[in-house]
Image (tube, helix red, strand yellow):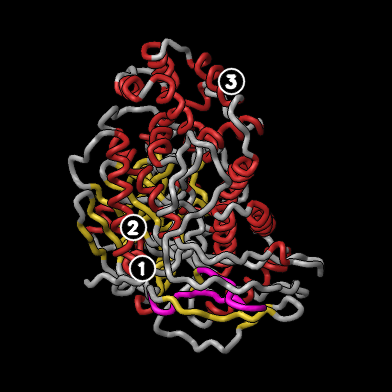
Amino acid sequence: MPLKKRVRPFLVAVFFLLTIACGPVSDLITRPTPISQLQLALVTEVTPTEAVVPPTIAATATHTVAPTQTSTPVPTETHTPAPTNTAEPTVPPTAEPTATPNDIYLNATDIRFHPAPCQYSGDSLSVEVFVENWNRFDPKTIEVALYAGSGDERTFLDNTIVSPFGIGGRMQATFYWAWDTTNLEGPQDLTIVLDPDDRLIEGDEDEANNTVTTTVLLQPDSVRPGNEAGGTWETVETDCCSILYTTNTAAARDIDTIVPIINDAVAHAEADLNIQLEEKIQINLLNRVLGHGGFASGTTMSITYIDRQYSGGQLWSVIAHETSHILDRKINAKRPTLLTEGLAVYVAGGHFKKEPLVTRIAAVLDDGDFIPFDETFVNNFYDAQHEISYLQAGALVQYLIERNGEETFFRFLRTLPEEGTHYERIRDGLRIQYQLSFEELETEWRAWLEDQPKNELWADDIRNTVNFYDTVRRYQSFYDQDAYFLSAWLPSIRQTISDNNVAEFTRHPATPENVTLELMLVEAENALQRGEQDKSTDMINRVNQILDRNELPDPFAVDPVAINLYQIVQQIMAAGYEPQFMETTGVNEITIHAIDNWPTLTTIPIEIGNFGDWKLAEELVPNDDGRFVSCN
């Protein structure tokens, strides 16, 4: 397949911040040249120990036209938008129990299907089942069975036991690709049975609440989204890596520019750790956001690469971080989480982006948000505030290396005791290699951090970074639960590729509500990258206002900017296009870049009226070729 050389901007969203009052808005309007994900990936590195300047972006040369400054009027209309016209979702399961049972049972709302949110004829469906009150038993004894159909007509598909799932270890029964829906279409029943052989006695008194039947709506294969229809997995080989991506995606479009970024990030990690790869890394470029955009397992990593990358993160930094995880297993296969994540942040020069670790953690300490290195934190690292914990771990690794040198640090990491909790192993290793207790190290390090020069601009940046990612995770918890990092849906990527299953890492919630909120998150992150802290804060607050109202029928009505954008997004999507990012293109004019025919982008001009109302500058021609389908 020929590799396309045209690169489109990725993290570009010049969003128009309007005030509810009719006062001046020029101080809220973002007018920089659009910045792409590829540009961010090549941002000039900030050496963590040097004197720090406010965060800036040193973009590589790309052919972009600086947008004209505009004065955007204030919107006056805040009526409730019309309901989204979407495909019918999976029919809810049969009725739940009227009272919460005390025994182990199945709740009809605790069943998820994949791919999601829609299912099509021909999908190979996976199922997650969350068993209520599972902790009354040894999970290994809790069996769950899956059947196609209902009643006496049902057919056995698979059975499994309850076990931990994901980084967060959520207890559930997980059925991978258990139901082949080839030649099936329309409503189809699926039955889940807890303890099918009736082996559980005490604690499972009511057998009636052990069975749930749900109806799955299988839409015709002919209406499958355009980025899935006919899609295949493709591979590019380099000296370090096998890079896999699916056709009809942004990664396929930009692969010629992606490859050198990956090669450079991997080489950097190898040099920093002084470890060479013994076999190629498999890097899978995914067409949907999962977690914070990157995961590694064994010699495989999976990285989000899309146009509307609302979870932020620079491609180079994510690749360097995940490569560190792959390489540091050769130092110690059982390294504690605090140290493996800290080393990855140190190697990448920051978390999600290059940043001065010491300056940022000194600001965290000054704000009173520093996390004590006690047993709770060290043994449950992933439960702590994500951004602060990762930066703290990275800065601690940097401090230990600068204190006694790399040789001592890597000997410390390599010779950690094999037995004990994460806290105990690090504590004992510190005593052997550094002649320090954990408490002495923390006291010494805190005193050193307190003496570091303060930089308020970087302090604002870390506060906004924490708020931004907390908001991203909050958005995922409400609107895209399968993306949430502690329980992200990540089945075997190798099996997915072997089966040429494109849908598994492509399909995702993409209603007008999703798209609007994601565009707002993109702009908040872009403002953060540009060092425009007030603009980033403002947009984060707007998103959270909407999330506060997520259970109401009109959550966007709370904000005049959001409701204007939401109504425009509805119109664009109804015509068969999927918005990806925006930019200022003239006085009282913006341009929305949208998918036309996957993965081609087209421009849709939007006019801003004198009273702040947004409207399409020209009538949209319905797009049948793109076959964009949205559903809940």
| Residue 161, visible in the rendered structure | yes
Which badge, 3 or 2, comes first in the chain's sequence?
A: 2
Q: Which of marks 3 and 2 is in front?
A: 3
* Image: magenta residue range: 581-598
At label 2, the amino acid type is: Leu
Proximity of marks 2 and 1: CB atoms separated by less than 8 Å: yes
User: At 58% from the left edge and 76% from the top edge, which residue is drawn?
Assistant: 585
- In the displayed structure, 164 sits above or below 260; it is above
Estimate the x, y position of residue 485 in percent, counting from the top left: 46, 46
Residue under numbered circle 2: 285
Estimate the x, y position of residue 11 in percent, counting from the top left: 49, 62
> Which image quarter is the N terminus in?
bottom left
Residue under numbered circle 3: 447
User: At 43% from the left edge and 16% from the top edge, which residue is drawn?
Assistant: 427
At label 3, the amino acid type is: Ala
Q: Nearer the viewer, residue 133 or 557?
A: 557
In the drawing, does residue 458 fall left or right of residue 171?
right
**Secondary structure category for the residue under label 3:** helix
Residue under numbered circle 1: 249
| Residue 384, visible in the rendered structure | no
> Label 2: how many residues lie within 10 Å, few (<14), some (14-19) or many (20+)?
many
- In the displayed structure, 259 sits above or below 425; it is below
In the drawing, does residue 522 fall left or right of residue 81?
left
- Measure the alpha-carbon separation of dots 3 and 2: 43 Å
- Measure the alpha-carbon separation of dots 2 and 1: 10 Å
